[in-house]
Image: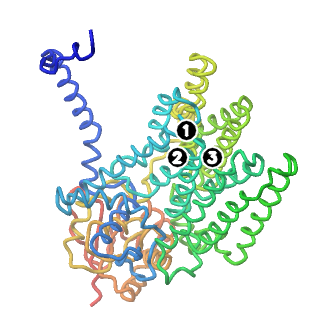
Amino acid sequence: MSLAESSNPTEPAPKTSPVRLLFRLVLVVAILIAAYQMLGPYWTRVSSWNLSDNDDAMRVLQVRDWLAGQAWFDVSQHRFTEHPVSNIHWSRIADLPLALTTLITSLMFGQSMGEKAAAFLTPMWLGLVYVIAAVKASVALGGKKAFVPAIFLITCAPAVLPYFLPGRVDHHGLQLIFLAAALWGLVAGGARMAVLSGIAIALGIGVGLEALPLQIVLIGWVALRWALRGAAVQDETRWFAASLGLGLAFCFVGTVPEAKWAAPVNDAIGRGHAVLGLVGGLLLALATLFPTARLGPRSGISSRLVLLAVIGGIVLSGVRYFPEVIVPPYDQIDPLLKRLWLNNVTEAAPMMKAKLSAILALTLFPVLAGIASIIALLWAKDKERDLWILAALTIFVSVALAVFWQGRAAGLATTVSGIMAAALIGKLMEQVNFKTALIAALIVNPIIPGFVGSKVAEYFEPKISKFSTGGGSGCFTERAFSGLKAQSPGLVVAPIDMGSRILLTTQHRVLAVPYHRNNKGNLASYRLFLAKPEVARTMAKDLGASYLAICTKSAEVAILSREAPKGLMAELRDGRVPAWLTPIEKPKGSNVQAFRVNLD
């Protein structure tokens, strides 16, 4: 029988049975109910502007002002006291995902609800992009059998998942995406993927410098691999180096106004990062054009190492002309603010200062993944060995950054670890057997070892109950600030961690915000609350303050009261309100106590 005879276009399609249709309907309804149960509480929080972090609130503000007409190159928050000096160290690149979503949701729901819908949706679709890039990287290194382990290891990591929950519109999730994309490009190989990797690293640096030490490791690995492998990787190296250098230049020119090109910046992409990155990238790309392979294996390696040393020397010598690139970004903060504010910001502190349970929960998985990478390195051969060297290097460097520098680097460590651990499990399934792969998966994963270790450690730790910096939900929500919002616009003097929330939920200006460039305003706020009430009155008058506000359940109240037992903050905490302040009625459930300043 021919194909034509067996196919009857007029024959009706087979009917789906009612039982099967009912099953599908029940499945869809169950999925919708599960999604509602899981995401409903997050929508409740976002719709009341009860965001997880100050930076999430500030990101919404940045996008709101930009879409309302503020210039692309103007990242100042105009309601800081020090404007126009008060531009924060953020990049417009990180505003793009939220802005794009806001434009769409505002057309659907209006400006106010559209903003909230965008803050709810943006982290989730960015999370999908992150999972795709990370899974692609795992499969590129570990083969097709790494797909399922990658889905589990990448989506269930406690150190990464919070960055993609509804409302988390800060830039850290975007940095993890660029890191995953950079690793994908490096392990996949080929000129096109090398371009992806170079651009991803450039964009990551353009967004923020928190991952710069790890990105330098990736760049150094590419350069050293070329010196040792030569012709086998010269095309990949050339395209990577050129795209990285040009990408950094474009990020700088495209996000920094021309008037600030000469400014020495050490907390965001600046002249030094752009120039040194461009020079280093182009020199490395040009070096790959030299025919060192004709000199023989040993002479070729020696020649490439010499070229690499020369390029490194040129780039490092540039520090003499751009010394700001090696200056710690928080050096400009006043010592008082470092002691009372910055040292109490959890994500900016090294994890070595955290409790053992927290350290184990967030770093045990990367440590195990690093050990597994070393084992895989001994097992692998040739070019694949280079990739496991990259895995071990990036994992251990990122763990060191989290433990000894800033705790937020735990997300970087977990990203690399998830990609590499899934690849290793895939390799074991393919080349050894399923049982061995399963044992490895049970040992090297982000849930079991860290959870068990942290719970055991937590059992022996003293139980300490205290408010977190910023306070509870009564200090965060739109309703909590409604009493202050009802007042005529003016300058609000409040503790540092209230600044972003006041700007988001009211029309007032603020003196203090949780950003290190606002050194003058933050210091003025703390000094006012530390001063005795009558001295504080004079300071409030000199500042032109209209209102004072505190969150009664904020750690800052306790910290400032402990620092100055007879200061204004201690008096307000204990309910002793000086005559020059009039309490503003606060709504039910609010822990925000605001005061009108009476200086007439």
Evaluate if marks 1 and 3 touch, with contact meaning CB atoms under 8 Å apart: no
Above or below 23: residue 280 = below
- Residue 449: image quadrant is top right
Callout 3 amino acid: Val
**316 with respect to 455 (left or right):** right
| Residue linked to disc 1 | 419
Callout 2 touching callout 3 (CB < 8 Å): no
Q: What's the coloring here?
A: rainbow
Locate residue 430, reporting x and y percent.
59, 22
**Measured Cα–Cα span from mark 2 to mark 1:** 8 Å
> In the visual, does 421 lie left or right of 49?
right
CA gap, disc 1 to disc 3? 15 Å
Residue tagged by mark 3? 399
Q: CA distance from mark 2 to mark 3?
A: 16 Å
**Residue at point 82%, 51% (across, down):** 294
Q: Mark 2 highlights which residue?
A: 180
The local secondary structure at tag 1 comes to helix
- Say which quadrant the C terminus sits in: bottom left
Residue type at mark 2? Answer: Ala
Q: Residues within 10 Å of mark 1 (few under 14, many from 20)?
A: many
Question: Which residue is located at x 64 percent, y 38 percent?
Answer: 367
Instruction: Check if mark 2's residue and mark 1's residue have beta carbons within 8 Å.
Output: yes
Question: Does label 2 or label 1 sit earlier along the sequence?
Answer: 2
- Nearest the camera: 167 or 27? 27
Q: Residues within 10 Å of mark 3 (few under 14, many from 20)?
A: many
Pinpoint residue 171: horizontal percent, then vertical percent.
44, 58
- The amino acid type, in three-letter code, at marker 1 is Ile
| Residue 69 in picture, x, y percent from top left | 29, 75
Quarter of the rendering containing residue 268: bottom right
Residue placed most toward the observer, 145 or 151: 145
